[in-house]
Image (spheres, helix red, strand yellow):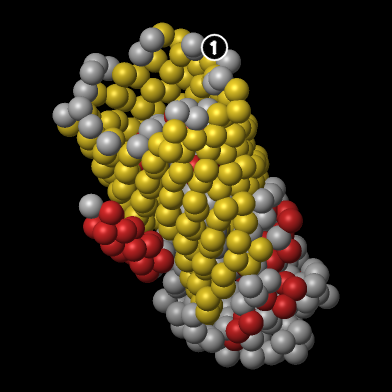
């Protein structure tokens, strides 16, 4: 049994890293695991499965000995950029970006996950959680920046960022109903950019030749997540979790694209929340999350200053700001076999309209999500889990000094269907 479990975990590990998707809160997933996603990621105070560690490691102390695995079919059904023509007919055909709608290809992805937890004693547990994430994935058939001098852009234009996270969690009870958890995290990410030749020159980058079309490159790094879970009384549970910045090795082949000579760390995040039983079978959940994109210069540096260069310490970035997210969820234990879930989340705007230029490559505009989920108990130990999430269309319009008086907009909408299986030992 242990050999089969280990083999399955390895297969999931490989599958996670071989797929890519465009996640929805910036490039962070709405949640982790099928049960959590059924409430659009709310649940720092409501541990339910072995993927709980990715939200709150302390919660692993209450989920028992179990295995959870599954996969999401993810579709960014519309993501792209609209370039407007110049309003003055005298300048028609001179737009830096050819007017038109640019719609990205690659609109269906498979994203697996795997979690395992074992009860060491009545007051301690050990677990493993593995999950994949793609953060920025676009592929435009056209040479999007073809009108930028020196007009040498090739097709396709786009970027691809894939990430894999693996963590080992130890949770322990410090006082009755008070749990702490810690999860060291190992991360791998892979990146590739194509079609950015107009930016690959000494006027726009510190390191020509390290901007685009250099193939896929790997980066590895580490971080840690801490969590606390407190059962205040029979009805109320509180939770707090913090994940450190994940310090990653640099993308040397793209040192001329990302700020700080190819640095692309993963930002820290924290979340606080509560779960309250309004009835014995109905639980309301609320979380507040902040993702600190502002601490990563490659993401947060503005791209509306033509005097700055790519790859420099203060080089051009995506103009992303810290994101605040409020998540609301409800869980209803309909009967002994069926549990129903629903959720809604709202986030602050990730970037301003003046930052739309580079966000053609990563139109992470989504702010609102709704979700539905369910679990059907099969026997006493196993359950089939489902979750569906809809990311509502959001558009950000504006202009950039690089494009003069030309305006445009980026937009995206998405859906995700996830199926999972849980088994308690």
**Residue 272 seen in the current view:** yes
Count up the numbered dots.
Answer: 1
Left or right relative to 384: residue 96 = right
Percent position (x, y) of residue 59? 50, 33
The residue that disc 1 covers is 233
Q: Nearer the viewer, residue 16 or 225?
A: 225
Percent position (x, y) of residue 115? 38, 47
Left or right relative to 401: residue 56 = left
Q: Residue at x 78, y 76 (%)?
A: 312
The answer to whether 143 is drawn above or below residue 424 in the figure is: below
The quadrant in which residue 223 appears is bottom right
The answer to whether 35 is drawn above or below residue 211 in the figure is: above
Which residue is outermost to the right?
307
Q: Residue at x 80, y 72 (%)?
A: 313
Q: Classify the position of the C terminus by image quarter.
A: top left
Percent position (x, y) of residue 162? 47, 66
């Amino acid at each position: 049994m242990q050999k089969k479990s280990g083999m399955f975990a390895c297969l999931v590990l490989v599958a996670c890293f071989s797929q890519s998707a465009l996640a929805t809160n910036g490039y962070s997933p709405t949640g982790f695991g099928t049960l959590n996603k059924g409430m659009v990621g709310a649940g720092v105070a409501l541990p339910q499965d072995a993927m709980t560690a990715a939200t709150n490691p302390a919660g692993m102390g209450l989920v028992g000995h179990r295995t959870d695995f599954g996969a999401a079919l993810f579709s960014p059904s519309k993501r792209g950029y609209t370039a407007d023509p110049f309003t003055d007919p005298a300048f028609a055909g001179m737009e830096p970006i050819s007017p038109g709608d640019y719609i990205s290809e690659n609109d269906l992805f498979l994203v697996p996950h795997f979690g395992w937890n074992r009860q060491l004693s009545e007051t301690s547990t050990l677990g493993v959680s593995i999950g994949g994430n793609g953060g920025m994935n676009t592929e435009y058939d056209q040479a999007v920046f073809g009108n930028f001098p020196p007009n040498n852009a090739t097709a396709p234009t786009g970027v691809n960022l894939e990430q894999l996270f693996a963590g080992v969690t130890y949770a322990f009870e410090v006082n009755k109903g008070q749990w702490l958890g810690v999860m060291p995290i190992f991360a791998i990410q892979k990146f590739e950019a194509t079609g950015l030749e107009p930016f690959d020159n000494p006027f726009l980058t510190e390191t020509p030749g390290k901007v685009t079309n250099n193939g896929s490159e790997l980066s590895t790094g580490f971080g840690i997540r801490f969590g606390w879970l407190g059962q205040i009384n029979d009805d109320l549970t509180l939770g707090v979790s913090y994940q450190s910045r994940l310090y990653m090795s640099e993308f040397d082949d793209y040192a001329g694209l990302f700020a700080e000579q190819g640095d692309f760390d993963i930002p820290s995040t924290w979340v606080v929340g509560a779960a309250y039983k309004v009835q014995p079978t109905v639980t309301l959940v609320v979380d507040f999350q902040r993702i600190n994109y502002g601490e990563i210069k490659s993401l947060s540096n503005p791209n509306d200053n033509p005097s700055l260069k790519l790859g420099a310490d203060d080089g051009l970035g995506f103009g992303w700001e810290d994101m605040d997210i409020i998540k609301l969820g409800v869980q209803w234990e309909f009967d002994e076999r069926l549990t129903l879930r629903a959720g809604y989340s709202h986030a602050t705007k990730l970037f301003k309209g003046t930052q739309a230029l580079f966000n053609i490559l990563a139109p992470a505009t989504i702010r609102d999500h709704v979700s539905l989920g369910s679990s059907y108990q099969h026997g006493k130990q196993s359950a089939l889990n489902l979750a569906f999430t809809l990311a509502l269309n959001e558009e950000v319009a504006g202009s950039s000094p690089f494009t003069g008086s030309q305006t445009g907009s980026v937009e995206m909408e998405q859906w995700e269907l996830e199926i999972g299986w849980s088994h308690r030992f």
